[in-house]
Each structure stands twice: as structure tokens, then as C-alpha cells.
Amino acid sequence: MTGFGGRAAAHTLALAALLLAAAAPPSRADFAEGLAALDAGDFESALEVWRPLAAAGDAEAQVALAGLYRDGLGFPADLAQALRWYRRAAEQGDAVAQLNLGDLYSRGEGVPRDLVQAYLWLSLSAAQGRRWPEQRRREVAALMTAAELAEAERLAEAWRPTE
């Protein structure tokens, strides 16, 4: 019994399966492919692999992509793009992104120097057991006023990752 209705249903199911496959998140193998390209010095291929992963919300790919932009590997450095991707990963709770974002704010690289933001992001990274952000946070705190420090601690306490 393969009348018109049967073929239409089969086509609909096939189309649905194709759409679901196309919408599936990229795999960790894709990320590893980007790492292999990076290790081989093929920065353009790493960028091509990681960009769709990052756009899909993969925090690890966002950090890797931000690093390419920050360091200008294979193309001119673009701190605005680096900040964009570090922020997206940091907001998801990625400790490495939080560390890097805090460091950029503390140095005023790509953004106006903002010790409150630096302290916030370094605190969040340090809270995940990282030693270097804890040390860097102490250095930043030594430069802050009591009001700035109180504001940064309030922000850190209230912070919640995005989903």
C-alpha cells in the first residue's frame, strides 16, 4: 500500500530527518579538527571550523576563536572580535574566558580599563579553582577604591551564567 499518501508521508519524514540532522550541534570531533589545523599552523581552517561551533554556543570553541582574534593568528588581530567571543563564553561560565576577559579589562586592551569588570571576571574564574586569576585579582584589588571593590564583589555575588 504505497499510494500517494504513503509517498508524501515518506517524503515528509525524510525531509524532517534532513532538517534535524542539519540542526544537530557540531561534534567534539569538529573541535578537534580545529585544534589539528591550529597545531599545523593552518589558522584559516581552524577559524572556519570553530566559527560555526562558536556561533552555536560552544564555549570551548568561543574561547579558541577569541584566542585567534586576540593574537591575530593568520590575520590581523581584532580585539573587538576577541572580546565578543570571550564575553559569550564567559557569560556561560567558562573559567578560561572569564580569566581572559578579566585580564583584558584590567589592562584596557580592546576596552576602556575597568577594574570593577576586571575584578568581577577574575573572581568568577578564581571561584572555579584557578590560581592565576586569584593572584591577578589580588593585583587588581590593590588598585581599586573601597567603593569599586564593593561594587565588584556585589556584581560577582549576583552573577549567574546564561543558558
Image (spheres, rainbow, N blue to C red):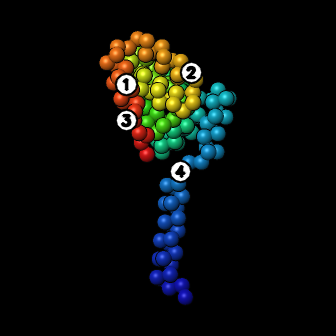
Q: Which residue is mark 3?
A: 158
**Nearer the observer, 67 or 126:** 126
* Mark-to-mark CA distance, 3 and 2: 23 Å
Task: Say if mark 3 contacts mark 1, CB within 8 Å.
Answer: no
Instruction: Indicate whether 109 appears above or below 28.
Output: above
**Nearer the observer, 57 or 93:** 93
Q: Which residue is mark 1?
A: 152
Q: Earlier in the sequence, mark 3 or mark 4?
A: 4
Question: What number is the disc on residue 132?
Answer: 2
Quadrant (top left/top right/bottom left/bottom right) for the C terminus = top left
**Nearer the observer, 5 or 131:** 131
Mark 3: secondary structure: helix
Q: Residues within 10 Å of mark 4 (few under 14, many from 20)?
A: few
Image position, residue 138 (x, y; %): 48, 16
Task: Say if mark 3 contacts mark 4, CB within 8 Å.
Answer: no
The mark closer to the camera, 1 or 4, is 1
Mark 2: secondary structure: helix
* Mark-to-mark CA distance, 1 and 2: 18 Å
**Nearer the observer, 93 or 4:** 93
Image position, residue 16 (x, y; %): 49, 66
Task: Say if mark 1 contacts mark 2, CB within 8 Å.
Answer: no
Q: Earlier in the sequence, mark 2 or mark 4?
A: 4
Q: Earlier in the sequence, mark 1 or mark 2?
A: 2
Question: What number is the disc on residue 25?
Answer: 4
* Mark-to-mark CA distance, 1 and 4: 35 Å
Q: Earlier in the sequence, mark 3 or mark 1?
A: 1
Quadrant (top left/top right/bottom left/bottom right) for the N terminus = bottom right
Amino acid at circle 4: Pro
Instruction: Indicate whether 26 appears above or below 76.
Output: below
